[in-house]
Each structure stands twice: as C-alpha cells, then as structure tokens.
Amino acid sequence: MPERGRLFVISGPAGVGKSEIVKTVLKRHPDVSLSVSCTTRAPRPGEVDGVSYHFVSDARFDELVRQDAFYEWAHVHQNRYGTLKEVVRAELDAGRDLILEIDVQGCLQAMAQDDTVTGIFVCPPSRENLEARLRHRGTETEESIRVRLNNVARECATAYKYHYIIIHQDWSVEPNALEIAAEQVYAIITARRRALESNRTFLDELNRSLNA
C-alpha cells in the first residue's frame, strides 16, 4: 500500500496569480496533482469543465451540500466553490501529493479538520500591483474589481494562520516572478516530504533493524 499523499492548500487574493503558479508547478512536476473544485460561477474564456472547475448550477451545489459531499465549501465573490471529498480521498489514498487552490474560508476549514494540511498563502507585492493584475485580465467588470479589492484586506489578514507565505513579485520588476513563485511552492512540497511525520514509518523500521 503506498504512503498516503499530502494535502497542500494554496490561497490568496483574486488576481494574485494563484492559478498560473499552480499550472506551472503541475507542468514542471508531474508528481503533484490538482484537485478540481466545483463552482457555481460561469466559465471564463478558455476554461474547460472538469479541467478548470466542475461548473454546476446552484441547485446541484445545494444537492451536494445536503449530501455532505464537500471536503470544504464557501461563498466567494458572490459565487460558491467546493472541494469534493471523494476527489481528495482518492488522490491521497493513491499516494499523490495534492494541491487545492481555494479561498481562505475553505483553507481554514481544511486546516481545522486535518492538522496535516499545509497552508500556502500567495501575496501580491502591493495593492497597486494587484489592481493592475485584475484589470490586465480583462475578465472583470468594474463592480467585480471593486468587490475583489474590498476583500483583499480581509483575505490578507488571514495569512497569519498559514504555514508559508509566497510573494508573487511584479513581473515588470522580476521577469521570472512566475517561475520563482512556482519553484518556491514546489520547494515547500519537497520539504514536507522530508518532514519527520512523513518519514516516521521508515525511521521506525530502520531503528528496529539497527537494534535487532
């Protein structure tokens, strides 16, 4: 039976670049998987159902809540997002290290029910940089941008509850900012693999053999 995988939760303000960081980690390191969340929001251009998210109706989301099917779920920017329990359990039981890219509400839920979860918070270098990133995406209305920026202070205040902080630098200052942030995430994953709790079984067996 394979060693159980580890769960890494990545959060941060909208527009900080979480999705691009996670995509870069997955592209470079196939030993890490991504849990695809459910959402009630509409797909953005280029997003694929079942790959980017499982796009579901409000009625279907309500049904999944009633079935206690979610590992965590939350209201985020006027929509709902949730992680299916069966997806998380299947990946971890198969020995895969799994990334959840979810809102701070979901991360706090995950860490509260499982003390082995590793929380990684991605910060922008400044408020001005974050606003510029949101506008550059071209997918947000003025109202949406206003709502998201108003939530930034609340979201960043929760960063103190995470285990690791990554600053996704301004690309105009650091052209390799995306690659640097992705490698910092993978460095955290690698370090957790070497932690005592991840190697206790091996260490127990080694010491038993040495003292036989």
Image (cartoon, rainbow, N blue to C red):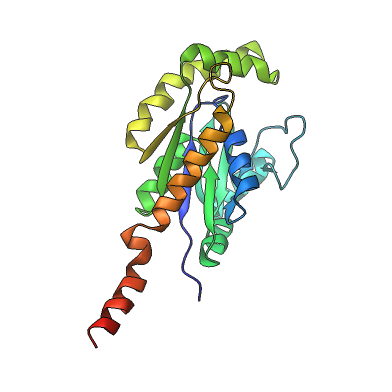
Q: Is residue 145 left or right of residue 10?
A: right
Residue 66 place in picture, x, y as percent: 55, 51
Residue nearest the viewer, comparing 14 with 21: 21
* Residue that extends furthest to the bottom in the rendered view of this protein: 212
In the rendered structure, the answer to whether residue 100 lies left or right of residue 119 reads right
* Quadrant of the frame with the C terminus: bottom left
Q: Furthest-left residue in view?
A: 211
Residue 97 image position (x, y, % from top left): 51, 56
Q: Residue at x 43, y 39 (%)?
A: 120
Image position of 195 with respect to 3: above or below? above
Viewer-nearest residue: 113 or 187? 187
Q: Is residue 126 at all visible to an observer of this figure?
A: yes
User: Horizontal and vertical percent for residue 53?
Assistant: 67, 42
Residue occupying the point 58% across, 16% down:
172
Q: Residue at x 50, y 76 (%)?
A: 1
**Can residue 144 be seen in the rendering of this structure?**
no
Above or below for 178 versus 142: below
Displayed quadrant of residue 201: bottom left
| Residue at screen point 57% across, 31% down | 178
Q: Quadrant of residue 67?
A: bottom right
